[in-house]
Image (tube, rainbow, N blue to C red):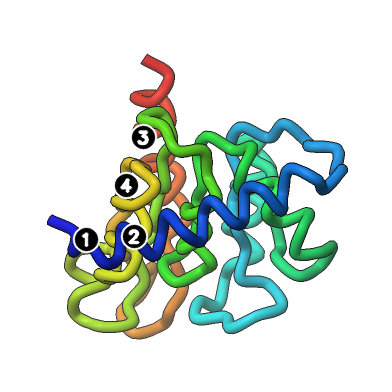
Amino acid sequence: SIDKKYIHIYNKIRSSHWSFFKHIKIKPLNNEIIYVSRKGGVERIKNESQLINLMIRMNIYVLSPNFKSFMFDVDQYINCRVMIGIEGTNLHNTLFMKKNNDCHVINIASNRDGCVKKYGYTYNQELCNSLSMVKMHVIPFKEVLPDTNIYDIDFIEKELTEILTSLKN
C-alpha cells in the first residue's frame, strides 16, 4: 500500500507536467518498446554494447537519455508501452508513461546489492511503477562468469522474448 502523501505529491507533479508537456511540439517516434541505455552514463556492466545490439536485432528502439534533449526523452517515455532497462537506468521515468493498465517496465536486474540482485528492483522503483499503474517484469541477474559484471546476453534474449511474447497475448 502506498502512503497517501506520495500519491498526493505524484498527482500534483503529474498534473503540472502534463499541462506543460501538452504545449511541446515534438514529433513522436511511435516506438511502442524502448530500451533505456546506460551508455554515456554510469556503466555498471561491461558488455552493454552487446545488449544494445540485441535490442536493435529485436527491433527495439534504443534511447540514450541526454543525447538529444530532455523533452525528446520524455516524449519517448510518454509514447511507449514497454520500457526496458537495467535496474537504475532512468526506469523511474515510468512516471511519464501513460497511466493505464497496459504499460509495462522490464527491469534487467543488476548485481548492485542484495535486494536488487534477489528481487530485481529497488523500493523507489516499485513506488514509481505503482503510482503510474505500470506492471513490472524482472529478468534476474545472470553473469557469464562470477564477479565479472558481464551479462549473459543469451539468457536475457530468452527471458525478454518470453516476456514480450506474453505481452502480445
Q: Amino acid at mark 1?
A: Lys
Residue 161 in view, yes or no: no
Relative vertical location of residue 139 with respect to residue 158 in this rendering, above or below = below
Q: CA distance from mark 4 to mark 1?
A: 21 Å
Q: Amino acid at mark 2?
A: His
The residue positioned 25% from the left and 69% from the top of the image is 123
Q: Position of residue 74 (x, y in %)?
A: 67, 54
Left or right of 46 in this view: 107: left
Picture disc at residue 4: 1
Q: Amino acid at mark 3?
A: Ile
Q: Nearer the viewer, mark 4 or mark 3?
A: 4
Mark 4 Cα-neighbour bin, 10 Å: few <14, some 14–19, many ≥20: some
Q: Please say if the residues under marks 2 and 1 sit with CB atoms less than 8 Å apart.
A: yes
Judging by the rendered image, the residue that carries numbered circle 3 is 163
Upstream in sequence: badge 4 or badge 2: 2
Q: In which quadrant of the rendered view does residue 4 lie?
A: bottom left
Q: Quadrant of the C terminus?
A: top left
| Label 4 SS | strand
Upstream in sequence: badge 4 or badge 3: 4
Picture disc at residue 8: 2
Q: Please say if the residues under marks 3 and 1 sit with CB atoms less than 8 Å apart.
A: no
Judging by the rendered image, the residue that carries numbered circle 4 is 136
Q: CA distance from mark 2 to mark 3?
A: 32 Å
Q: Nearer the viewer, residue 150 or 114?
A: 114
Left or right of 78 in this view: 167: left
Q: Position of residue 1 (x, y in %)?
A: 12, 56
